[in-house]
Amino acid sequence: MLLAVLRLPWAGDLGIHAATVQRLRHSLLAPGNPLVDADTPSPYYSPWMLVLGLLARLTGLPVFVVLRIGALAGLGLLFTGVWRYVRTLSAHRAAPALALLCLVLLWGPDLLNWSGFLGLNSLALTVAYPSVFALGLSFHFWAWLTTTLRAHPDWPRWIALGALWALILLCHQFTGVVATLGALATVLAARPDRHLLPRLAAALAVGIVLLWLWPYYDFFALFSAGTGLEAIHRSLYSDLLGRFGLALLGVVALALRWRRDHRDPLVLFFVLGALLFAAGGLTGHYSWGRAAPAALIPAQLAAALETVSAGRRAFRLGWACVLGAALAVGAWGQAGMLGYVVPRDALPAPIAAKYRPPWVGYRWITPWVGYGQVVMARTVPSRQIPAYGPYTVAPGYPDVFLPDQAGRDAAVARYFDAGTSSGTRRAIARRYGVRWVIGPAADAEPWLRPVTTGPSGQVLYEVRG
């Protein structure tokens, strides 16, 4: 993973997080929309990204260097958080290491790359995302909450727990849901005394107040964001066995834990996560599928802990053999991740066949396209171009705070439609202040001047006049 941080393979949402740091580096107080030239709030302006933006502003370091620093911090939080939380569940010295192996390998033969999901290949691609930082905080949060419920400390610690809960939700909202379900399971399993209820209420109130006070976006407005996120998350409900099949071993381990303790925190955590995930599929709220880690994490941890649990030695040995075989299958399924840190031609042919090259990026346009200038581009380029400072006409991702996103998407689609006249294209470009256009040679217009050619025959055009 450290080598993956050095390479920082480009895919998915990396562009939007780089763009967020870019905007904060230029304006901490009024950064505007990170992707398009509009003065709107954005949920990507989280406390963690604010820290990275401030670091970039004070040091002058390139954005991708800052993201690598953030990735190192996120990894450190994640690994130490898993260690601390697992220590609250088992005193066996092998438990944390087994837990880490299960979290990154106990998935399925088919890859799922998504922020907040801890498969090894997914983690390599999302290591610089706020989701990794938030997941690391979540494990520390669960560990701290567990020890607090056992020790019954004074009010300040409960207040700090409420602040930490709000921080996780602000840094990555979907991971915040997972953290909340894990905290609820921890509280239900602990059966706190009545005198602890005011402390729990105070922690909750502090968290809610901090969420309400955060100045960069309205957190509670996300609950009425509409259906824009549902279509993009529908794929989370496909190929469940291929993506999560190995985690079924953890479900068996959870059943064994439930037989020993009907209020086991991992069992309750799994039930809450599975219910929310299932509800999303049944009701069409596919974005609820991002709660899947709330079911996967406790199952994966249970599979690891069953190897070191009390009981017959023969059973533990047999379980270890089964778990070892499952981990080997999971490792083989994600072996292509090695291509992110080892040249592909140096890999054995069977592993090289699993490698999927990351995105190339658009650094090739930076000698000409300046910060804040608007580029007309299709969806995939629009997911990368803002990382280097420019804006695009339409964001490459759904934006719940951008009121005219539908109009922007329609304008881009119309511009690149083969049947659109040159005059209409020119009018669209003027409407959105377009300075540059990226497309194939077929997109050339008399009022466009070709400047340079990039990968796959893409041409950078400058708008004349």
Image: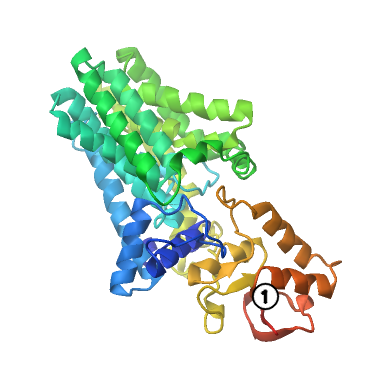
Q: Percent from the top left, x then y, of residue 442? A: 79, 76
Q: Residue at x 30, y 14 (%)?
A: 260
Q: Residue at x 44, y 30 (%)?
A: 295
The residue nearer to you, when weighing 313 against 204, is 204
Q: Percent from the top left, x then y, of residue 160? A: 22, 37
Q: Is residue 79 above or below residue 390?
A: above
Q: Percent from the top left, x then y, of residue 11? A: 52, 60
The N terminus lies in which quarter of the figure? bottom left
The C terminus lies in which quarter of the figure? bottom right
Q: Residue at x 31, y 19 (%)?
A: 188
Q: Which residue is mark 1?
A: 437
* Type of amino acid under label 1: Val
- Relative placement, left or right, of 159 versus 63 is left
The residue nearer to you, when weighing 304 against 18, is 18
Q: Residue at x 43, y 22 (%)?
A: 271
The residue nearer to you, when weighing 358 against 179, is 179
- Relative placement, left or right, of 128 versus 345 is left
Q: Is residue 314 above or below residue 71?
A: above
Q: How many marks?
A: 1
What scheme was used to colour the molecule?
Answer: rainbow
For residue 90, say whether it is visible. Answer: no
The residue tagged with tag 1: helix, strand or loop?
strand
Q: Percent from the top left, x then y, of residue 35? A: 54, 62
